[in-house]
Image (cartoon, helix red, strand yellow):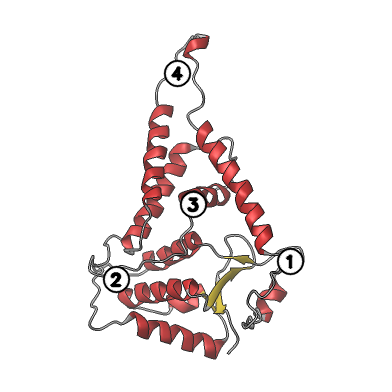
Amino acid sequence: MNEELSTDYAIKLDIFEGPLDLLLYLIKKNEIDIYNIPIALITQQYLDYIHMIKSLNLDLAGEYLVMASTLIHIKSRMLLPIPEDPSEEDLEEDPRSELVRQLIEYQAFKEAAEKLAKRPLLERDVFVRSAALPEDMIRSRPEDDELIEASIFELIEAFHNIVARLDNKELLEIDLEKLSLTDIINDVMDRLTRERNLTFEELLGERKDRRRIVYTFLALLELIKLKMVKAYQTAAFGVIRIFPAVES
């Protein structure tokens, strides 16, 4: 998607993870050794994600841009020629070492937080009855595999792939008088109530109007923020399925 949404219309969401989450996602997606990051590849993919997020006019924290500058700086340092016979005093630390340290430390805290979050807490969600996961989703996963909640980055990438397949390459223009985000949110919830669950492709891919696809995706993000729907996968980077968070 080459054009950004109208600057008069912006969605501010609280569900974004930080730049370190994006880097960890890219490292896992590319099956990269965290101690030997191909900085040119990761920098380019990181910048691509920044562009995708900005093209949706979503609220982008300043930390993302700081990390982009850091990656570009590391990349430039690694492009410097290595002396043929460097003396000990000329030897420098790997430019990636500080970033690797931050990633490993952050990953450890994140994994600890996820384990704590899975523990039952007194009076948490007392009045909410969670919706049952789709039977076909449960049956299709290997016994040892755990259902994975899709990250914001996976949703954005899946959205981008759908838009990229569209034959119609017209400029993206949002007509606020004709499209209402509230109406699209209601439409998404009505569909999920009827169908019980939908794949990401079914939810967005049936739309032929580029503007409606964008609004449907924004509606989905808003519903996830409101904890009204959940997005799960049966495996990392697998098919994303959307279902109501609470039984009707």
Q: CA gap, disc 2 to disc 1?
A: 39 Å
As displayed, is residue 118 above or below residue 18?
Answer: below
Mark 2 Cα shell of 10 Å, populated few (<14), some (14-19), many (≥20):
few
In front: label 1 or label 3: 3
Q: Which mark is residue 82?
A: 4
Amino acid type, callout 1: Pro
Q: Position of residue 225 (x, y in %)?
A: 47, 71
As displayed, is residue 145 above or below residue 214?
Answer: above
Q: Which mark is residue 142?
A: 1
- Determine the secondary structure under disc 3: helix
Query: Is residue 216 toward the left or the right of residue 115 in the image?
Result: left
Amino acid type, callout 2: Asn
Give the residue at mark 2: 168
Pick whichever of labels 2 and 3 is earlier in the sequence.
3
Q: CA gap, disc 2 to disc 3?
A: 30 Å
Pick whichever of labels 1 and 3 is earlier in the sequence.
3
- Determine the secondary structure under disc 1: loop
Point 25% across, 74% down: residue? 174
Task: Please identify the quarter of the rendering in which residue 218 is found.
Answer: bottom left
